[in-house]
Image: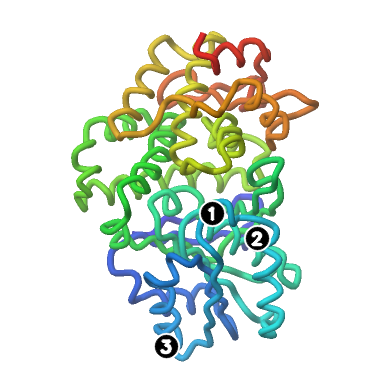
Amino acid sequence: MTVRVAIAEQRDASYDIVIGRGLGGRLPALVQAACPAARYAVITDSHVATLCGERLVTALRDAKLHADLFQFPAGEWNKTRETWAALSDRLLAAQFGRDSAVLALGGGVVGDVAGFVAATYLRGVPYVQAPTTLLAMIDSSIGGKTGVDVPAGKNLLGAFHQPRLVVADLDLLATLPAPQLAAGVAEAVKHGAIADPDYFAFLEREHDAVTTRQPDALEQLVRRSVEIKAGVVAADERETGRRAILNFGHTVAHAVEATVKFAVLHGEAVAIGMAYEARLAEVLGIAAAGTADRIRKLLERYGLPRELPESATADGLLATMQLDKKARAGTVRFALPEAVGRMHADGSSWTVTAPEGVVRDVLAGR
């Protein structure tokens, strides 16, 4: 199946997300059709390189495409300026020109780093996203956000750079470690919470089918999440309006990740963030009573964390939140639900401020 991301602000930036099984074998043809180039830089991490990176380069070469593999050490802690610089320097040393393209093969870290390389290399070259994790398939590979983390926080350096194509091969989910699958489901829960109560109910109802990786359930999950994310980003490419709803849970999540030095998976941090931000919404009188409890219960069913790590103190989290990309004039902003499936809008803004004391109390569990 194919979902079109029709970018309203730039029609020539629109692209397809192809979802299906056995797409690995079709990847060279799909890439060549959507993103023709003289040379392809396949960027991946050390883990994915062994699993399927080398095989993909061989397939590209068998299809008479000039491709080379560039890898960096796996792990969110390697999503840095130094990694971006090293990859860029290696492409320059290999004399990749402006007629080249990047193929990002991996999870969210790879997609963000490779996308940032593509956005900045020789002032920008095209790229394709080939996500290998559930979270990357339904969230991070869609929308053109690229970037790296810095000591001050997550994704604070980056660029908007839309891919030419996203290819989500569902076969890759069969061997995905259980914690990675659950981390991806966290983003699916977010999609239901912000935009589709029926989808949220599907995730409640089909828990067993999803966790045992029943093909129909996973296909429906990926398809609906992709449709939701694509619809939101297509109408607001650079997050000047409604796209901010995708940040539900992320103000707290990014602070947690930075505070614990990425000792938790991104999806796990998002789960924690949604649990606390939904509670904040109720305390502020924005969300209907019971909204936070329903979200927390679904996260618990999928084995996702709902409590802050011991090392993440309210003071430390609040200090980190001041550096969040959504902060304005020194105030922290949150995207908050009114109910499952409906987000709150404050006039023309989809985020709200909250008194520091209230946020502190919520983080402290008071």
Does the residue at mark 1 contact the one at mark 2 (Cβ under 8 Å)? no
Q: Residue at x 38, y 24 (%)?
A: 295
Q: Residue at x 75, y 73 (%)?
A: 122
Amino acid marked by disc 3: Ala
> Which label sits in the foreground, 1 or 2?
2
Q: Secondary structure at mark 3?
A: loop
Residue 308, given in percent of the width and then of the height, sits at 49, 26
Q: Is residue 242 visible?
A: no
Q: In this rendering, which labeled residue sits more in front, label 2 or label 3?
A: 2
- What secondary structure is marked by label 2? helix
Residue 116 is tagged as 2
- The residue tagged 3 is 63
What amino acid does circle 2 point to? Phe
Disc 2/disc 3 C-alpha distance (Å): 27 Å
First along the sequence among labels 1 and 2: 1
Closest to the camera, between mark 3 and mark 1, is 3
Within 10 angstroms of label 1, few (less than 14), some, or many (20 or more) residues?
some
Identify the mark nearer the N-term, 3 or 1: 1
- The answer to whether residue 124 is seen in the rendering is yes
Q: Position of residue 69 (x, y in %)?
A: 52, 78
Image disc number at residue 6: 1
Q: Image height check: is 229 above or below 320?
A: below
* Kind of element beneath mark 1: loop
**In the depicted structure, whether residue 165 falls above or below residue 306:** below
Q: CA distance from mark 3 to mark 1?
A: 29 Å
Q: Nearer the viewer, residue 320 or 355?
A: 320
Q: Give coordinates of residue 107: x percent, y percent.
A: 46, 57
Q: Residue at x 28, y 64 (%)?
A: 21
